[in-house]
Each structure stands twice: as structure tokens, then as C-alpha cells.
Amino acid sequence: MQNNFTNKLNAFSVLYVEDEDGIRNNIEEILQHLFKETNSATNASEAYAKYLEFNPDLIITDIKMGAETGIDLIRKIRKSDSKTRIIITSAHTDLDYLLQATELYLVKYIVKPITQDKLMNALEAFVNTYDEDKIYNLIPNWIFDYKESIISNGNEIFTLTKKENTFLRLLITKNRLITYEELENSVWDDDSMMTANAMRLFIKNFRKKLPENFLKNIQGVGYKLVRD
């Protein structure tokens, strides 16, 4: 059984930067099974071009890669981007590298050799940075991002309306049936009337963005989520 955080990884993309072919091929194979999209690069210059092209959610980069280092790459990215998560890998543990790395808002610093345990711990830390921004796991491979107001299943992204976003978060955080009265008071917060027709249309459109059979209607009472 997959851990909860590994299910979430399928909603994200990653760029892996490593100049040693053997290491890069091995780690890239693992990442391809975990992420929605995986790209790789062999040096800082190639990595920056792929960063601009693919806009990854996570960058995992080695430090020493010839003329331009991983630190140089991250500094270049950080001039205009403070959001993309970054993990550094390096055989070096000297204080100078560590001090440079702390200034660059990193998720994790992995000391080589990269074992599966080290990698998974770093990836869990990556996912946790999104949990702080309210990322919810609906079912395996289905992610609800409250802050961005989207649902992703790894292949498609569905943009939620304000009402849909509020309603789904209410269903998740309360973790119980939400009555029609709660729906009207907590979600229908504008001047429009929550008529039977308006609610039917709202639920019909909302279900198109959810996993199949995920939202259940309890006739005459309200709605609940079905996660089994």
C-alpha cells in the first residue's frame, strides 16, 4: 500500500539534475513512477532551460556539475521565483556549501549516496510544504488544492468556483454529512436564492470535477463524501 504522501506526488512535476549518468538514470526511474511528469538534465545550463520550458513543481539538483554549480542554478532561479520547491543532493557536507544552501529556501539537503529512504524522506518534506498551503488528498492520485481552488487527478486539472471550493473544504474538514441548511448558510453566501433548481445545477456541475461516486446525496438531508 502506498503512503498518503506518495499518492499526492502524482499531482506534481519534477526536474532532476545530475551529471553522473548512472545515478541520474537510477533516480529518474524512481521519480517517473511517483510524479505526474519527470524531466532530467545533466548540467546547470540545460537544467535552467528545462525549468523555463516545463515549470516544474520540484527541482532536485546536485551541487557540483562542472563550471556552473547547483548553487549557481538555484540562485538564478531565485532571482524571480521563490515558489518552486528545491532539494539539493551532494557528496559534500562542508559548512560553506551548507551555509550557501540555507539562503536559498530549500526543502531538503540530501547527502550522497542517495538511498531510497533518504529520497522518500525528502519527497515527504516536499509534500508537507504544500500541506501547509491546504493540499488535500481525495482518493489516490486525486488532489484538492484549496488555496489554488483546483482539483487534479494527475492528468486533468479542474478549476473550482468559489462555492465549489468552499463546499468541498467544508465536506473534508467536517468529515461528516453536510445538511442542506449548512450548505445554504456556509456556501450560498451571496444574494442569490438557493432554489432546488440552482442547487441541482450546482451539484451536477460539481460532480463533473470529482472522482466518480465521490459525492453522495442523502435524500432529504444533505451530502457526504464516499472515500471507500
Image: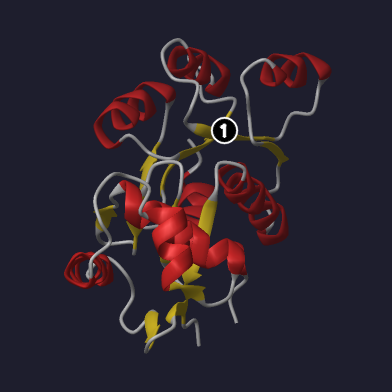
> In the image, is residue 190 above or below residue 175?
above
> In the image, is residue 98 above or below residue 223?
above
Q: Which residue is rendered at x = 59% and y = 26% of the image?
A: 63
Q: Is residue 116 left or right of residue 130?
A: right
Q: Which residue is rendered at x = 71% and y = 20% of the image?
A: 102
Disc 1 packing (10 Å; few <14; some 14–19; many ≥20): many
Visible residue check, residue 141: yes
Residue 189 on image: x %, y %: 38, 47
Total labels: the figure holds: 1
The front one of 228 and 172 is 172
The front one of 187 and 87 is 187
Secondary structure beneath label 1: strand
Q: Which residue type does callout 1 highlight?
A: Asp
Quarter where residue 183 is shown: bottom left
Residue 52 on image: x %, y %: 29, 26
The front one of 109 and 203 is 203
The front one of 179 and 47 is 179
Residue 108 on image: x %, y %: 68, 37
Q: Name the residue under label 1.
A: 62
> In the image, is residue 1 above or below residue 174?
below
Q: Which residue is rendered at x = 38% and y = 39% of the image?
A: 56
Visible residue check, residue 10: no
